[in-house]
Amino acid sequence: MKFPSTFGRAGVLAPLVLPALALAASAQEAAPEAAAPAAIPTSGLDSGDTAWMLVSTILVLFMILPGLALFYGGLVRAKNVLSVLMQCTMITATVIVVWVLWGYSFAFGGGTSPYWGGLGKLFLVGVGPESESGSIPELVFACFQMTFACITPALIVGAFAERIKFSALLLFVVLWVSLVYFPIAHMVWDSSGLIFGWGALDFAGGTVVHINAGVAALVGALMVGKRDGYGRDNMAPHSLPLTMIGASILWVGWFGFNAGSALAANGTAALAMINTLTATAGAAISWAVVETLARGKASMLGAASGIIAGLVAVTPAAGFVGPVGAIVLGAVASAVCYWFVAVVKIRLGYDDSLDVFGVHGIGGLVGAIGTGFLASSSLGGVGYAEGVTMAGQVWTQILAVLVTIVWCGVVSAILYKVVDMIIGLRPRPEDERQGLDISAHGEVAYHS
């Protein structure tokens, strides 16, 4: 695709969205007059499953707004809190529109390609009240998956918070979900997908959401560069109470994320629910213990970080491991994430503002590979497919992780470069010093 050399701020998405809207409008004009509503057949639908998936969809949206927005908002400096809230809000709105226009088709369009879903369901053609996906309406499935598509790019912004142009971010998100998220979602979760065909276990998005977001975040942090004054100025979180509120909302919403991925109100959802409790508890305790041993004190920020690390780690494993295995997985992942954030990042010297790679990328990696071990029935898991050994499953998990890292890393780097050439990734130094709340949005969070 050839992009024009410049875009006005208000018209960043116009070259991508306007043609799609025009096509949708023409299709609507050509449609015949709607007949009177008819009874919707419910032959294969289950009202309990449908009700649970409606609730799960709302819970995942609750994770983003206000959960993730508040979690990130509390971690940045006061002069940038509204910019982070605005980024999470507009990413969610933008991806919802993209998902309806072409995202659902790219991911779950019914094509036979191992890499993408094709064009068969552009504009949600054929996806109506009468179409079914298992025991739930396909529209509910589409909405549930839509919320996953929204939260993944919203996670990325934490890596370069306080130093990204708003217009550049939105353009990057449209390109990134189209060329990275949708293909990976298809490969992992669609029955014709490459990684699905390998038999990889990813219950709710260890690769699709967390490794994907973590790798894109790391690439972005490196390509956008360090914050002005990094290593010199005080960049401590401005409101840990906001961060704790956000982390708590994320934990509540994560039950929709994990238990909802059973796509039914059944025993698998119950297993995912208890694992979302136990893994997260194990991770919070683990982070506090490790931090006490390393620093002499356990911090509130550490507890919130441990909660997120545990939630991330159990995401791919939620429906496959037992409750005790989930505790072990959460505790191990949390300790590894702490080491990466407190030691590795500092030694390497890169500026991942809110530790997206250190928690989501590393936690997702530990969770995805750990699922291969802990799914074993001998360790309390549900067991493997017939003929699959632990070694074979672990190797499959590693391959899935490697494909996600390479695909996401390479394509993300290209997209950051393209956006930088078109718009520029960084605001002006004086705008960054003033704070993005004022320079990008003309408002402040707190009045003295």
Image (cartoon, grey):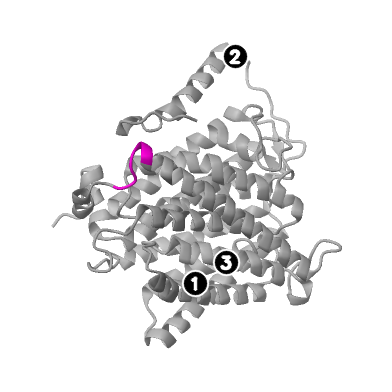
Q: Position of residue 226 (x, y in %)?
A: 32, 59
Left or right: 104 as drawn, with respect to 45: left
Q: Secondary structure at mark 2?
A: loop
Q: Is residue 78 visible?
A: yes
Q: Position of residue 354 (x, y in %)?
A: 38, 62
Which residue, given by chain and number where applicable, does mark 2 sit on?
A: 31
* Residue 424, magenta (yes or no): yes
Amino acid carrying mark 3 in the image: Ala
Foreground residue, 430 or 420? 420
Q: Decide which of tag 3 and tag 2 comes sooner along the chain.
A: 2
Left or right: 93 as drawn, with respect to 282: left
> Marks 3/1: CA distance?
10 Å
Q: Which mark is residue 59?
A: none
Q: Residues within 10 Å of mark 2 (few under 14, many from 20)?
A: few
For image coordinates 45% across by 58% down, the residue present is 218
Which residue, given by chain and number where applicable, does mark 1 sit on?
A: 337
Image quarter for residue 41? top right
Q: Which residues are magenta?
A: 421-426
Q: Is residue 319 visible?
A: no
Foreground residue, 260 or 236? 236
Left or right: 219 as drawn, with respect to 403: left
* Residue 425, magenta (yes or no): yes
Q: Position of residue 211 (x, y in %)?
A: 55, 58
For image coordinates 52% across by 43% down, the residue present is 177
Residue extending farthest to the left is 448
Q: Nearer the viewer, mark 2 or mark 1?
A: 1
Q: Secondary structure at mark 1?
A: helix
Which residue, given by chain and number where applicable, does mark 3 sit on?
A: 313
Amino acid carrying mark 2 in the image: Ala
Foreground residue, 34 or 371? 371
